[in-house]
Image: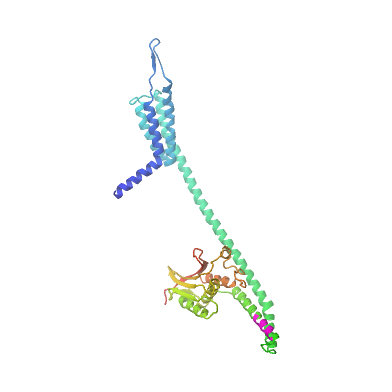
């Protein structure tokens, strides 16, 4: 079958799908017109002719033509209604004029009926066209409203996130004033007093615990301040693969940690702040190794996708729960027992400040996947 023949077949199928029922109704009604007898009985004594009951069916058939005309108008608008009306008239004229059978109605009645066929087809088609146009406008309006609602929801989420970040900033400023100075005094005093006791002395062990805990508290406070004061660094082309390799070296000697692997385009160039991106990769790698466990696998996959430099942090851990996905990047939310959630929140802010993105790939399975994207650079 040639392409032209196939196209013709498709046209016929489409025509029959749209007008097939109306066409079948017109043919059936026309057949009833032609096949229904019309003659009456003549009384020779009175000279009168009486019409049988079935002769009245022709008037009913004339009115039945309106149904396929209206149906065709609904399917094809004014054009469909007019075409159906013209077909009805073409099939009815031979019967109305007595060339094929005979309609016992008066000539005036029959020709007025044919005029009404044309009028009904045109008016119905015009009304249907207006209804379809109004429906299309309503559909466009509904889509615009849905888009506006989605934008409003996204803006509300951003405002909530901004409010949370502002609260963290105020809290961090208070912590810096109220905690850090006394904490430094406590740590210094513990160091001085601890020198008076040898390591094996019970009190010496207590001072070591005090120093370790004050150091840990100081690190938490430092993360608070780093998050609150995070500002975008100067952006410039840098080797993202080199930063990934540097993170790999930093984690190479960590005890009880899954080895970090790097694959893909190891010379991938991106635009951003190399020092801040190294911090982001380190945070992501630490979270991934914690999720994978000592026997798991963690891989940084580097690739260029269009004008974006992409780094996927994959781990063989249990993946992200729905709660973790919903609170991704939220300060103070963490699935780790002693986590604060500020490392991931800081990483998200850095990525966005540098014009990139940081998000969970929920389609990755098994394990977890976080995708960092930045603007790609062609400079080497």
- Find the magenta span and give its range: 204-212
Q: Position of residue 112 (x, y in %)?
A: 41, 28
Percent across and percent down for residue 30 are: 38, 30
Residue 79 makes an appearance in the image: no
Q: Quadrant of residue 205?
A: bottom right
- Asked if residue 247 lies left or right of residue 330, the reply is left
Q: Does 223 appear in magenta?
A: no
Residue 298 spot, x, y in % from top left: 50, 73
Q: Is residue 206 magenta?
A: yes
Q: Position of residue 352 (x, y in %)?
A: 53, 69
Quadrant location of the C terminus in the rendered image: bottom left
Instruction: Using residue 281 as the reference point, say whether residue 88 is left or right of it.
Output: left
Q: How many marks?
A: 0
Residue at (39%, 18%) from the top-left corner? 40
Magenta: predominant secondary structure element?
A: helix
Q: Nearer the viewer, residue 270 or 220?
A: 220
Give the color scheme: rainbow, by chain, secondary structure or one colour.
rainbow
Residue sitting nearer the eye, 154 or 257? 257
Can residue 139 be seen in this snapshot? yes
Q: Is residue 140 above or below residue 79?
A: below
């Amino acid at each position: 079958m040639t392409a032209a023949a196939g196209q013709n077949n498709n046209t016929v199928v489409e025509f029959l799908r749209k007008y097939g029922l109306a066409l079948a109704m017109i043919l059936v009604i026309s057949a009833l017109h032609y096949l229904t007898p019309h003659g009456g009985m003549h009384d020779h004594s009175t000279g009168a002719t009486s019409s049988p009951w079935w002769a009245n069916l022709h008037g009913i058939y004339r009115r039945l033509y309106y149904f396929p005309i209206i149906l065709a108008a609904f399917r094809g608008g004014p054009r469909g209604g007019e075409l159906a009306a013209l077909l009805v008239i073409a099939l009815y004229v031979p019967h109305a004029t007595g060339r094929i059978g005979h309609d016992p109605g008066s000539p005036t009645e029959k020709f007025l009926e044919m005029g009404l066929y044309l009028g009904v087809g045109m008016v119905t088609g015009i009304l249907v066209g207006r209804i379809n146009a109004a429906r299309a406008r309503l559909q466009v309006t509904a889509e615009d409203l849905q888009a506006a609602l989605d934008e409003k929801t996204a803006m509300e989420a951003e405002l909530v996130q901004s409010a949370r970040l502002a609260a963290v900033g105020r809290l961090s400023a208070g912590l810096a004033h109220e905690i850090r100075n006394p904490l430094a005094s406590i740590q210094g005093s513990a160091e001085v007093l601890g020198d008076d006791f040898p390591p094996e002395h019970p009190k010496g062990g207590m001072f070591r615990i005090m120093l370790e805990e004050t150091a840990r508290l100081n690190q938490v406070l430092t993360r608070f301040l780093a998050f609150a004061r995070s500002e975008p660094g100067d952006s410039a082309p840098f080797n993202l693969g080199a930063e990934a390799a540097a993170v790999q070296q930093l984690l190479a000697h960590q005890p009880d940690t899954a080895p970090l692997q790097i694959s893909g385009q190891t010379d991938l160039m991106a635009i951003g702040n190399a020092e801040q991106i190294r911090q982001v990769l380190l945070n992501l790698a630490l979270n991934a190794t914690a999720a994978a466990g000592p026997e798991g696998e963690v891989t940084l996959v580097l690739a260029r996708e269009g004008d974006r430099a992409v780094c996927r942090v994959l781990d063989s851990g249990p993946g992200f729960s729905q709660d973790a996905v919903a609170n991704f990047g939220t300060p103070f939310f963490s699935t780790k027992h002693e986590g604060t959630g500020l490392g991931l929140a800081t990483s998200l802010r850095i990525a966005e400040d540098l014009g990139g993105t940081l998000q969970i790939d929920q389609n990755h399975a098994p394990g977890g996947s976080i995708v960092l994207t930045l603007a790609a650079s062609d400079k080497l």
